[in-house]
Amino acid sequence: MKFSATISAGKFELHLIAMKPVERMVREQIAARGILDERVLMAMREVPRHEFVPDDLRDQAYEDRALPIGWEQTISQPYIVAFMTEALEPQPEHRVLEIGTGSGYQAAVLSLLVREVYTIEIVEPLAARAAETLRKLGYDNVEVRSGDGHCGWPEESPFDFIIVTCAPEEIPAPLVEQLREGGRMMIPVGASGAQELILLEKHRGVLRRKSVMRVAFVPMTGKLGR
């Protein structure tokens, strides 16, 4: 019996070694921490995170942390991407606005779950790079714009949900206006070191607000930012 247990353990260890980094990321960092939506888990498996990080950080692409992508911006921790995505309950017919394109990784994940993604990045070189990466990888239902995220994308509104991946000190009023009735917004709010991730739901023009967790996002810059 002791010999059989040793063999089984050895096979388990070999399986872990052979497991693809993206599968290990999904199993150990995301599913193990309570993300249950199979569509979200599928999207996290399908999107090659290493394509969205600088070449010198590709060996760290599937680690459980944010990584720098230049211009003082980061690609979010995989768990946070999955958590925010699941909380918004994406459906195939949804049209989505993302504020803070960054690398384009969150937009790529969303693109597998919804009909259309509109994403805004204030740093023009990042927007251009993200657009090129998304185009190269075939995420054709994502449209990238360089601009001030506080203003949203009024001509394409209303949106079924809005996801914000940078932290303003106050919730921008134009984003509230561009959220459809019954829609949801996930947004980190607050100054550096004191940010809360907040889930908002719009009912009869009024926002229901739920504080979700403490987080650390890059600050939102632009018209009302720092």
Image (cartoon, rainbow, N blue to C red):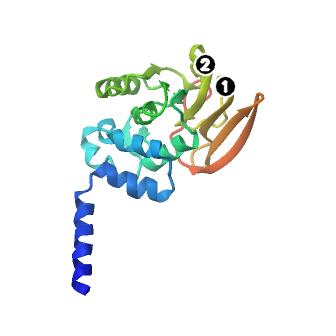
Q: Nearer the viewer, residue 56 or 79?
A: 79
Mark 1 Cα-neighbour bin, 10 Å: few <14, some 14–19, many ≥20: some
- From this view, report whether residue 104 is shown above or below residue 40: above
Question: Could you say where residue 86 lies in the image, as x and y percent from the top left?
Answer: 53, 43
- At 50% across and 47% down in the image, what residue appears? 37
Q: Secondary structure at mark 2?
A: loop
Say which amino acid is labelled 1. Arg
- At 40% across and 43% down in the image, what residue appears? 42
Asked if residue 226 shows in the view, the reply is no
Say which amino acid is labelled 2. Ser
Q: Is residue 122 left or right of residue 26?
A: right
Q: Secondary structure at mark 1?
A: strand
State the residue lying farthest toward the top: 155
Q: Is residue 37 left or right of residue 199?
A: left
Q: Nearer the viewer, residue 25 or 147?
A: 25
Asked if residue 1 shows in the view, the reply is yes
Q: Quadrant of residue 109?
A: top left
On residue 209, the disc is none
Q: Is residue 99 left or right of residue 67?
A: right
The residue under label 2 is 157
State the residue lying farthest toward the bottom: 2
Q: Nearer the viewer, residue 123 or 96?
A: 96
Marks 2 and 1 close (CB-CB < 8 Å) = yes
The residue under label 1 is 180
Question: Could you say where residue 87 lies in the image, as x and y percent from the top left?
Answer: 57, 43
- At 27% across and 68% down in the image, what residue appears? 12
